[in-house]
Image (cartoon, helix red, strand yellow):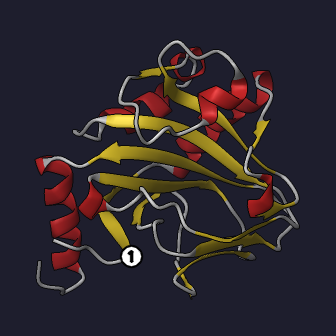
């Protein structure tokens, strides 16, 4: 089954508790600039909450390798109890989990991540932690109305772009999940709630 290019999943998380864990991260952590420089202008960076087993280099830890399945929690996640609770709500295998920050005035240029589609077995899920009204995230040229604490599947094998034209950082909790019966059911429920036949 082919799902739409965006789908709000039927659960949400507490924005205040998300921000509290982000504050813990900001206190102790150096963000790593995204390594695909041609895809953005400005400052787009990440920190790993789950990363490939055995990796210690910051760039290797934030890389979401489509081939690997041996992802493990990082020490940073251990210091973030609400992020742990959020991830525990997902009853499916989780690969990479990152916090991804786009600073004011920064733009992620249109690009496609060819391995990120539910029908291919992988789902990228975004949970906004901080944002502002002047952040625009488009998939296939159409803006996605991402609100704080909401949970969105986005088919990022399609063309997408993000611009932060505001004055504050945009930080998303970005989860790369592997499809299973539970996640398929959540997405099917979301379709039904939107009045779309599965």
Spot occupied by residue 58 in the image (x, y as percentages of width and height)? 71, 25
Q: Quadrant of residue 8?
A: bottom left
The residue closer to the viewer here, 133 or 41, is 41
Q: Going 29% across and 39% down the picture, which residue do you hit?
A: 89
Residue visible at 13% across and 58% down in the picture: 185
Quarter of the image where one finds residue 45: top right
Residue wearing tag 1: 5
Q: Is residue 113 left or right of residue 134?
A: left
- Quarter containing the N terminus: bottom left
**At which x and y percent is residue 130?**
66, 55
42 or 194, nearer to the observer: 42
Comparing 133 with 120, the one in front is 120
Q: Residues within 10 Å of mark 1 (few under 14, many from 20)?
A: some
- Residue at 77% in and 35% down: 32
**Up-down relation of residue 42 to residue 28 (above or below):** below
Quarter in which the C terminus is drawn: bottom left
Tell me where residue 120 appears, x and y as whole percent: 28, 58
Q: In the rendered view, does 141 fall on the left or right side of 124?
A: right
Residue 134 as seen in the image, left or right of residue 114: right
Q: Position of residue 163 (x, y in %)?
A: 75, 72
Task: Please report the residue visible at 74 percent of the width from the left and 62 percent of the height from the top.
Answer: 39
Could you tell whether 198 is left or right of 155 in the image? left
């Amino acid at each position: 089954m082919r799902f739409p290019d965006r789908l709000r999943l039927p659960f949400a998380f507490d924005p205040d508790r998300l921000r509290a864990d982000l504050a813990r991260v900001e206190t102790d952590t150096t963000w790593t600039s995204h390594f695909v420089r041609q895809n953005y202008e400005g400052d787009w960076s990440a920190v790993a909450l789950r990363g490939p087993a055995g990796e210690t280099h910051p760039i290797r830890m934030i890389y979401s390798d489509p081939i690997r399945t041996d992802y493990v929690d990082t020490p940073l996640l251990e210091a973030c109890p609400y992020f742990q609770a959020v991830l525990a709500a997902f009853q499916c295998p989780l690969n990479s989990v990152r916090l991804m920050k786009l600073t004011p005035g920064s733009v992620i240029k249109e690009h496609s991540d060819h391995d990120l589609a539910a029908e291919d077995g992988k789902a990228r899920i975004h949970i906004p932690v901080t944002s502002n009204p002047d952040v625009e995230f488009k998939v296939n040229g159409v803006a996605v109305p991402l609100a704080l604490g909401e949970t969105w599947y986005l088919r990022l094998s399609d063309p997408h772009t993000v611009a932060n034209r505001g004055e504050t950082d945009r930080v998303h909790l970005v989860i790369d999940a592997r499809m299973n019966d539970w996640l398929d059911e959540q997405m099917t429920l979301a379709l039904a709630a939107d009045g779309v036949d599965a």
